[in-house]
Amino acid sequence: DADVTQTPRNRITKTGKRIMLECSQTKGHDRMYWYRQDPGLGLRLIYYSFDVKDINKGEISDGYSVSRQAQAKFSLSLESAIPNQTALYFCATSDFQWGTAHTGELFFGEGSRLTVL
Amino acid sequence: AQTVTQSQPEMSVQEAETVTLSCTYDTSESNYYLFWYKQPPSRQMILVIRQEAYKQQNATENRFSVNFQKAAKSFSLKISDSQLGDTAMYFCAFMKGMGNDMRFGAGTRLTVKP
């Protein structure tokens, strides 16, 4: 089983609908992130969380909200989806400890492709 | 804000040849990390190589190596003996020392031709 699991993998919805993308991890990491990927723009950070009580906006948070239900779960919501939110969404985790072989590395889920019609 | 620039949207290379992907970044930080991630058609994001800014020695991982020029803020990826399985999008990424977030370049699509 994947260490970082995203559901759904693919979703088609209509403008104005509420959508939730879910992420769960078994890596035991405190830090979790949501990114969106668009062609020609790379990955851009939407929100990140360093623990259950710590939520931070990223580069492009407008139109999105998040919930950190537990250390292992971090969900992303689109309250009223619009077509320009059509993208590939990634959840990622990190265990940021100085001086380790994995310092700074993000571990990604398999992505959720969202299409808003 | 930190920015990461990949100036080559697409590249191709013949199997067994060597290819270099370019990346430049802009930051006022002195402590940071740099990464190259690979995204094959499966869309999974896979870490290729990482570099700590405080280390002068260039990182290497088997056929993958970097040329890290801190003063020039350049971080290129060299792939030696290219294989068909290296066909993918490659993203350069930057993370500040405290790891608040990782910033990505727009990506370079690499095609390895038989």
Image (cartoon, coloured by chain):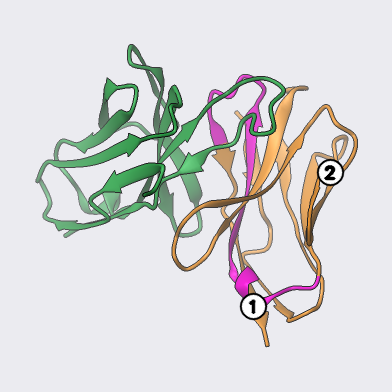
Along the viewing direction, whichever of A102 and B55 lies nearer the viewer: A102
Question: How far is the residue under mark 2 from the one under mark 1?
Answer: 26 Å
Q: Colour of chain B?
A: orange
Judging from the image, what is the letter of the chain drawn in green? A
The numbered mark at residue B68 is: 2
For marks 2 and 1 on the same chain, the one whose residue lies earlier in the sequence: 2
Q: Which residue is drawn at the image coordinates 28% and 21% (left, top)? A: A70
Which of pointers 2 and 1 indicates the residue nearer the eye?
1
Residue B97 in magenta stretch? yes
Q: Amino acid at mark 1?
A: Leu
Q: Which residue is drawn at the image coordinates 64% and 43% (left, top)? A: B4
Q: Chain of mark 1?
A: B
Tell me which segment is drawn in magenta.
Answer: B81-102
Q: Relative to A9, does residue A65 appear above or below in the rendering?
A: above
Q: Relative to B82, does residue B91 appear above or below in the rendering?
A: above
Where in the figure is residue A55, as x and y percent of width and height?
36, 18
Left or right relative to B107: residue A67: left
Q: Which residue is drawn at the image coordinates 78% and 58% (left, top)? A: B62
